[in-house]
Image: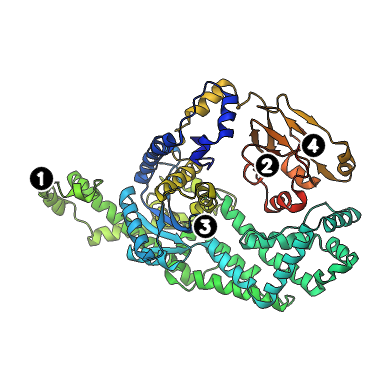
C-alpha cells in the first residue's frame, strides 16, 4: 500500500511479471494481492481512514483558508482542480500550542464548458462535506477567471493572489521583451550545442582543467519556469571563459559566440533573479505561516532588487520595470488585499513595527485589528448565551435530506431558555461595546510593548507561550494566518498530481485520481500518520530490507581503461553484474535509497567529480565505486535520487547515456 499510495506507483504494478519475481525472490511465502483488491478495497479503506483523521483536524480548527490549483493531464487530456485547506491548529493535539496545518481535500475534473459553474458547485459540495462551509475565510488562487468567479459566487471574503504565480507572471513578461527573448534563445542554442556534441563537451572539460575550474556541464532550461532559466544563465556566467575558449578554437561555430554586451546582460539577469530564487526557497522551506512575510518581502524586492540603477543596461531596466509593475498591480492596487496583508504582518511579532507604512496607515491597521477582535468577542458572547439545544441545530452535520426529517418545532425548554437569554444575557449593548473596546485596546497596547522577535525565531511559538496573556488577539491571528501566501500544498502537489496520471495509467478515473492524490499529499503532510502499513511493520520486524543487506554478494569489477579518466577529475562508474536478488544501498543527499531488482545491471558511465560527490557523498559504503543501476523498474535517477536540475540534465544528456550494457 505504501508503494502505491506514497510512492506514486500505479496499482497495476502488482501485475508486472518482474515485480512478482522480485517479491517471490525476497519472500517466497508472501502471496501478492491482485490489482482489483487494491483498487476496490485497500485504497478506499486507506482513503476512509485518512479522511476521518483530516475531518477531526478540520473540526478542531476555528477557521481555515483554501488554495486551488488548476492543472492538466496531457496523457488523459483532462483538466483537474486540486483543493487544499490551511489552518492553525493545536500542535500534537495540544490546544495551547499553535501550529500550521495543510491538508488536501479533493481533486476533481473540470470540463471545458461551464468550468466556473462546475468549480463553484464542487467547491460548495466539498465545503459541506468537510464541514468548513462557515469557516472558509480566504482563498489563495493563481488568478484564473474561472476560480475567481467561483470564489466570488461563494462569498469568500479574501481572494489572495499566489505569490509564486505572481513572481512567475512578472518574470515571464520580462523574458518576453524583444531583446531579452532573443538573448535567451541564443543561450539555449549555445547550451544545446555543448550537450549534443561530444567533441565540444571534451574541449570544454579541457578548458576547465586548464583554468583550474570545477568540471561541470552547461545546464539547459528544458523544465518550464524561470528557475530553470536562471540555472542556465548562472552556469553560463560561471563558465564564460571556458565556453568562449572552446568557441574560439571551433571555427565552424563562431556564430554561437556571445558578445560582451550579451554577457553583461546575462550577469545583470542573474543578479536580478537571484533574490527571487532566494525568496522562493525561503517560502518553500518555511515552517511558519508565510502570509505575514509577503509585505516585508515585497517591500524589500520593490525598493532594492527592482530599484532601477544608473549602471543598469536598458534591457535590465526594462525588465525591472515590468516585474515591479506586475507585483504592484497584483498586491498594492487592491485595497482589501493590501489591508489584509498589512494586518497579517502586524500580528507577526517579527514585523509588527511596520516600518514601510506611514503613521496614518499603521493606525488604520490597528483599527482594523480592534474591529475584528470586537466582532469575535461579540460572536463568542452570543455563543456563550445560546442554549445547548440551539447549538445542535446551528451547524448540522447531516445532509439536507436528513435535516428535513427532523422536527422543525424546538423543544419547550429551548423556547424558555431563549426568552431568559434575551433578558439576562443581552448582547451588543453600549456597555458591552465599551468593555470589549477597552479590553482589545489594552491587549493591543501590551502586544506593541513586547520586544520585537528575531527574524530567525518562531512566531507561532511566541504566540503559543503567551496565549494566557493575550486571550483575544490569537483568535484574530487565526483568521489571517490561515490564508496561505502561496498555493503551498497544490504547488508542491503539481509534481505529484502529474505523476499520478502517467502514460501507464492514463485510464484512471477522476475518482481514483482524487483518492491517490489525497492519500499521497496527506501522507506527506502527516495526516493519519498512525496508519502504518502492516507489510512495512513485518519487514522491519524481520530485520530490514527486501534481501537482507545492502549489496550482499555483489560482483563489481573495475574497468582498467577508466582509471586515467578518473585521475583526470571524472568520477567513472564501474561495470559488472549484481547477481539475482542482489541490491545496493546508496546514500543520496542524506537519504538512503535502496535499489532492489531480481536482475540488476551496472552500466559504465562518467560524470564530473563534483556532481558525483553531490550525488554520492564520501560516506557511501562504496566510496570508490559510484554507480547507477538499471533494473526491472527502469532508469530512476530523477525519482529516487534527489538531484538538482543541472544534475538531471547531465545524467540524461546524450553524451552520458549508458555506454555499454553488460
Mark 3 near mark 1, Cβ–Cβ under 8 Å?
A: no
Q: Earlier in the sequence, mark 1 or mark 4?
A: 1
Q: Secondary structure at mark 4?
A: loop
Whether 564 is drawn above or below 122: the answer is above
In the rendered structure, the answer to whether residue 579 lies left or right of residue 109 reads: right
Q: Give the x, y percent position of residue 565.
A: 87, 44
Query: Dot 3 corresponds to which residue?
Result: 74
Real-space Cα distance between discs 3 and 1? 57 Å
Tell me which label, 2 or 3, sits earlier in the chain. Answer: 3
Q: Is residue 580 left or right of residue 91?
A: right
Mark 3 packing: few (<14 Cα in 10 Å), some, or many (20+)? few
Residue found 63% across the figure and 25% down from its top: 547
Q: Position of residue 401 (x, y in %)?
A: 20, 49
Colour mapping used in the image: rainbow
Say which mark, if any, is on residue 411: 1
Q: CA distance from mark 1 to mark 4?
A: 82 Å
Residue with the mark numbered 2: 589
Amino acid at each position: 500500500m505504501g508503494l502505491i499510495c506514497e510512492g506514486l506507483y500505479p496499482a497495476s504494478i502488482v501485475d508486472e511479471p518482474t515485480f512478482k519475481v522480485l517479491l517471490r525472490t525476497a519472500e517466497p511465502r508472501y502471496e501478492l494481492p491482485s490489482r482489483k483488491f487494491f483498487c476496490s478495497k485497500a485504497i478506499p479503506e486507506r482513503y476512509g481512514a485518512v479522511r476521518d483523521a483530516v475531518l477531526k483536524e478540520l473540526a478542531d480548527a476555528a477557521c481555515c483558508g483554501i488554495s486551488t490549483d488548476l492543472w492538466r493531464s496531457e496523457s488523459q487530456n483532462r483538466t483537474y482542480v486540486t483543493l487544499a485547506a490551511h489552518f492553525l491548529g493545536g500542535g500534537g493535539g495540544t490546544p495551547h500550542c499553535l501550529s500550521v496545518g495543510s491538508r488536501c481535500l479533493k481533486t476533481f475534473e473540470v470540463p471545458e464548458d461551464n468550468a466556473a459553474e462546475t468549480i463553484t458547485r464542487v467547491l460548495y459540495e466539498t465545503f459541506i462535506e468537510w464541514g468548513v462551509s462557515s469557516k472558509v475565510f480566504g482563498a489563495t488562487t493563481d488568478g484564473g477567471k474561472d476560480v475567481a468567479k467561483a470564489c466570488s459566487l461563494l462569498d469568500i471574503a479574501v481572494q489572495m493572489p499566489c505569490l509564486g504565480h505572481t513572481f512567475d507572471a512578472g518574470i515571464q513578461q520580462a523574458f518576453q521583451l524583444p531583446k531579452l527573448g532573443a538573448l535567451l534563445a541564443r543561450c539555449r542554442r549555445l547550451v544545446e550545442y555543448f550537450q549534443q556534441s561530444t567533441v565540444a563537451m571534451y574541449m570544454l572539460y579541457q578548458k576547465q582543467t586548464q583554468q583550474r575550474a570545477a568540471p561541470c556541464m552547461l545546464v539547459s532550461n528544458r523544465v518550464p519556469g524561470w528557475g530553470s532559466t536562471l540555472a542556465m544563465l548562472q552556469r553560463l556566467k560561471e563558465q564564460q571563459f571556458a565556453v568562449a575558449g572552446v568557441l574560439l578554437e571551433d571555427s565552424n561555430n563562431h556564430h554561437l559566440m556571445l558578445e560582451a554586451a550579451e554577457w553583461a546582460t546575462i550577469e545583470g539577469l542573474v543578479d536580478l533573479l537571484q533574490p527571487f530564487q532566494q525568496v522562493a526557497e525561503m517560502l518553500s522551506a518555511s515552517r511558519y505561516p508565510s502570509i505575514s512575510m509577503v509585505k516585508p518581502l515585497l517591500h524589500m524586492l520593490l525598493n532594492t532588487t527592482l530599484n532601477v540603477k544608473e549602471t543598469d543596461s536598458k534591457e535590465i531596466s526594462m525588465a525591472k520595470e515590468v516585474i515591479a509593475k506586475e507585483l504592484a498591480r497584483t498586491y498594492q492596487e487592491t485595497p482589501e488585499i493590501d489591508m489584509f496583508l498589512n494586518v497579517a504582518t502586524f500580528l507577526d511579532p517579527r514585523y509588527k513595527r511596520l516600518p514601510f507604512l506611514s503613521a496614518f496607515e499603521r493606525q488604520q491597521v490597528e483599527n482594523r485589528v480592534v474591529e475584528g477582535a470586537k466582532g469575535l468577542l461579540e460572536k463568542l458572547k452570543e455563543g456563550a448565551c445560546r442554549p445547548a439545544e440551539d447549538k445542535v441545530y446551528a451547524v448540522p452535520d447531516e445532509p439536507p435530506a436528513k435535516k428535513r426529517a427532523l422536527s422543525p418545532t424546538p423543544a419547550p425548554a429551548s423556547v424558555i431558555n431563549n426568552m431568559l437569554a434575551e433578558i439576562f444575557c443581552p448582547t451588543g449593548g453600549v456597555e458591552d461595546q465599551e468593555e470589549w473596546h477597552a479590553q482589545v485596546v489594552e491587549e493591543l497596547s501590551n502586544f506593541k510593548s513586547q520586544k520585537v522577535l528575531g527574524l530567525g525565531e518562531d512566531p507561532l511559538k511566541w504566540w503559543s507561550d503567551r496565549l494566557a496573556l493575550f486571550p483575544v488577539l490569537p483568535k484574530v491571528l487565526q483568521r489571517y494566518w490561515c490564508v496561505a501566501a502561496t498555493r503551498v500544498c497544490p504547488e508542491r502537489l503539481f509534481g505529484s498530481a502529474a505523476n499520478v496520471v502517467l502514460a501507464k495509467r492514463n485510464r484512471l478515473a477522476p475518482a481514483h485520481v482524487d483518492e491517490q492524490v489525497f492519500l499521497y499529499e496527506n501522507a506527506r503532510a502527516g495526516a493519519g500518520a498512525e496508519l502504518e502499513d502492516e507489510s512495512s511493520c513485518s519487514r522491519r520486524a524481520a530485520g530490514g530490507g527486501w534481501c537482507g543487506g545492502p549489496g550482499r554478494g555483489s560482483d563489481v569489477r573495475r574497468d582498467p581503461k577508466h582509471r586515467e579518466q578518473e585521475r583526470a577529475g571524472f568520477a567513472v562508474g564501474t561495470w559488472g553484474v549484481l547477481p539475482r536478488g542482489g541490491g545496493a544501498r546508496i546514500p543520496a543527499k542524506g537519504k538512503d535509497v535502496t535499489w532492489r531488482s531480481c536482475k540488476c545491471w551496472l552500466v559504465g558511465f562518467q560524470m564530473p567529480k563534483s556532481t558525483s560527490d553531490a550525488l554520492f557523498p564520501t560516506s557511501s559504503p562504496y566510496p570508490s565505486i559510484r554507480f547507477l543501476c538499471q533494473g526491472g523498474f527502469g532508469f530512476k535517477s530523477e525519482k529516487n535520487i534527489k538531484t538538482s536540475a543541472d544534475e538531471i540534465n547531465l545524467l540524461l544528456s546524450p553524451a552520458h547515456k549508458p555506454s555499454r550494457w553488460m
